[in-house]
Image (tube, helix red, strand yellow):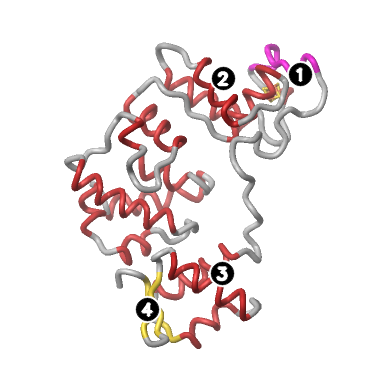
Amino acid sequence: MLVSEVMLQQTQTSRVIEPWTRFMVRFPTPSACAEASLKEVLTEWRGLGYHRRAKMLHEAARTLRDEFHDVVPRKTAQLRTLPGVGPYTANAVASFAYGEPVAVLDTNVGRVLARALVNRRLSPSEASALADELLPRTGSASFNQAMLDLGAQFCRATPRCVECPVATHCAWRHQGGEDPAPHSAGVSRPQQPFEGSNRQLRGRVLNALREGSHSRRQLLRHLVGATASRRDEVLAGLIRDGLITCHEQTFSLAGD
Ligand code: SF4
């Protein structure tokens, strides 16, 4: 559950299934991941992007091995101490893995709350308070899953109100007016397009280095089309994030 939630943080479900399966076969326990090198973890992360998540997950695995007897904790306060685990991921793991009574709030749920319940824009703290208030005393994991599905399947950026199972109770549908949840409903920042982004360039560098070390000249061939300053920025960013290293003009995956 923790691995899937970290992978799903900024990646669609359909793109996570294959890497998640591969990752869990290779690292079935936190200690299996903790004892692997970062290079091995980055290799199993292929296809997912946002590689800092892999580094954080590797660090979280080491914390789980060293401080939690190789078991993911159930309380959100403890989950939040793990590297890379923010409020959404902590609540999702606590709810879906352990049935803890905590609300799971992402962009999709934020849209449902703003549109169906109050028909006005919500600040992140208002959305969080409303999600907590709405949580039933029993069956909270099923309720959270239903809210996520409602937002993902029906209450999308362009809503499918005609087919929506809660349409008869929806405040926005009844009252009308401007969409109270445009873009990401104030819950998260919208993602920038992938094509032409630094994310795309970072992915190209890491894909090349998964095959082995490269000289600077060899590596720059994978960044054709980017300006010199952009290429420097991408390489410096990867070194700063601890994902790659550079010794005497030779670049390698960190932990190689
Ligand atoms: S009726 Fe439309 S706006 Fe209301 S919750 Fe359903 S999909 Fe969202």
Q: Position of residue 126 (x, y in %)?
A: 59, 24
Element class at badge 2: helix
Which of the two marks, 4 or 2, is nearer to us in this view?
2
Q: Nearer the viewer, mark 1 or mark 2?
A: 2
Across and down, in percent, residue 140 comes to 43, 19
**Range of residues picked out in magenta:** 166-175
Q: Residue sitting at 50 percent across and 44 percent down?
A: 13
The residue carrying mark 2 is 130
Label 1 and label 2: CA atoms lie apart by: 19 Å
Q: Is residue 75 above or below residue 184?
A: above
Q: Are marks 2 and 3 in contact (CB under 8 Å)?
A: no
N-terminal of the pair, mark 3 or mark 1, is 1
Q: Nearer the viewer, mark 3 or mark 1?
A: 3
* Residue behind label 4 places its C-beta within 8 angstroms of ligand 1: no
Whether the residue carrying mark 1 lies under 8 Å from ligand 1 is answered with yes
Residue 157: x and y, percent?
70, 36
The alpha-carbon separation of the residues under discs 3 and 1 comes to: 43 Å
Tell me the residue that label 3 is attached to. 201
Determine contact: label 3, label 4, CB under 8 Å.
no
Q: Which residue is mark 4?
A: 212
Residue placed most toward the observer, 238 or 217? 238
